[in-house]
Amino acid sequence: MDFESLSADLRSLQARALEEISAAVDPGALDALQIQYLGKKGDLTAVLRGIGALPADDRPRVGAIANEVGEAVKGALATRGTELRSQVQTIRLAAEKVDVTLPGRPVARGALHPIPETIEAIAEVFGQFGFVIHEGPEVEDDLTNFQMLNIAPDHPARDLWDTLYVDIPGYLLRTHTSPGQIRVMQSTRPPIRALLPGRCFRYEAVDASHGSEFFQVEGLMVDEGTSMADLKGLLDEFAHALFGPRKTRFRPGYYPFTEPSVAFDVECVVCGGVGCPACSKSGWMTILGAGMVHPVVLQYGGIDPERYQGFAFGMGVERIANLRHAVPDLRYYLENDLRFLEQFR
Ligand code: PHE
C-alpha cells in the first residue's frame, strides 16, 4: 500500500459517495449513506486502516485528504438533506392546501323547543321576584302526590287527577307539580320562594287541549304574613310580563291543598275581552290555579301554620305556550315534527 493508491481510493470513495448522495430520494436513504460512508464501520474508516502501512512522512498527507473527503461527504449530505426536506414540505403544502376564499359551511342553528322556552320565560319573571327553581321526581309516591296535599285515598277530589300508576305499590306518575311543594317545605326553611317546573302525567283521552303527558310550573311562597294580596300582585306582574297590560281577575276555585282557592284569568289575548271562539265568548282566559296553602299542607311540610302563611299556584305550560305562539293543538309539542319546531328559531 503506498500513498498514491491510498489517496486514489479516497478520491474515488468521495466521487462514489457524492454521486449516491445526490441520487438519494428520501431522508431515510441519506441516513443509510451517512452510516455507510462515515460510520464507525464505514467505508472511509476502512480505507484509513491502510494508513499504518505507509511511511511516517506520508501519513499526515493522507490524513489531510481523508479529512477533506469526510468534510465533502458531510457537506453533500447536509445539502441534499435540506433539498429533500424542502421537497417534502412543498408536496405537503400542496396536498394540504386550503382555499380560504371558499364560502364557509353553514352551521345549522337549533332553537329551544317552545315548551322549555316558555318555562324559561316564566322562570325569568318569577326569578325577578326571588323565586328559585327546584325539581321533584316524575315517579312520585301517593303520599306526596295526594295525601300530604290533603287528598285522602277515598277523597272524591282524586277524580280531578286521572292517575297513571307504576308497578311499585304506593308509587305513581305525578299528576301535577304540587307534590314539589311538600318536598321543598320538607327540605328548606321559610322564607321560601320556589318555582317547580316539570313533566306531569294523567290518564286522559288525548285531544287538541288534553294530553297524557304535559308540563306544569308550580310556584310556592311561604313566609310570615304572606297574604292573598301578595299572590294577586305577583300574578298580575306575571300576566303583564307575558301578555302585556291586560285586565286580570280572581274567580273562586277549589283545590284540597289551598284555602281559599282561585282560578286566575287574563283578558282574552286573542280578542282583548270582547268575546271570541278562543275564549268561548267569555272574554277571559284561565291561565292557572292558585290559593293560600292549606294549614294542613304546611304542617305536612313541617311548617308551623300559626307562624307562617303561604300561597301556591300551578299553571299548564302548553296553555301558556299556545297563547304566546298561537299554537292551536298541544299534540304538536310532543310529535317532534321539524316543520313545527323550526318555526321557533
Ligand atoms: N296542582 C293543581 C292542578 O294540577 C294546580 C294548583 C297548584 C292549584 C297550586 C293551586 C295551587 O290542577
Image (cartoon, rainbow, N blue to C red):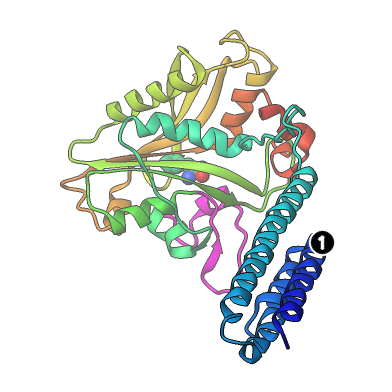
Kind of residue at badge 1:
Val
**Extreme-left residue of the structure:** 307
Q: Would you call the spot at circle 1 few (<14 residues within 10 Å), some (14-19), or many (20 or more)?
A: some
> Is residue 13 highlighted in magenta?
no
Residue at figure coordinates x 63%, y 66% from the top left: 68
Compared with residue 324, is residue 85 higher up or lower down, i.e. above or below?
A: below
Mark 1 within 8 Å of ligand 1, using the beta carbon: no
Residue 203 position (above or below residue 314):
below
Which corner quadrant of the image does residue 94 belong to? top right
Residue 125: x %, y % from top left: 41, 29
Q: Residue 194: image x %, image y %?
A: 35, 44
**Residue at the bottom extreme of this rendering:** 53
- Which residue is found at the position 28% from the left and 51% from the top? 298
Is residue 175 one of those drawn in magenta? yes
Residue placed most toward the observer, 51 or 201: 51
Q: How many marks?
A: 1
Q: Is residue 247 left or right of residue 103?
A: left
Q: Residue at x 59, y 71 (%)?
A: 64
User: Which residue is nearer to you in this view: 343 or 214?
Assistant: 343
Residue 1 placement: quadrant: bottom right
Placement of the C terminus among the 4 image quadrants: top right
Tell me the magenta residue range. 150-176
Residue indicated by mark 1? 25
Q: Point out residue 191 in the picture as x, y percentages from the top left corner.
A: 22, 44
Q: Position of residue 242 (x, y in %)?
A: 49, 22
Element assignment for label 1 = loop
Q: Confirm whether residue 224 shows in the render.
A: yes
Q: Name above or below for residue 48 compared with residue 144.
A: below
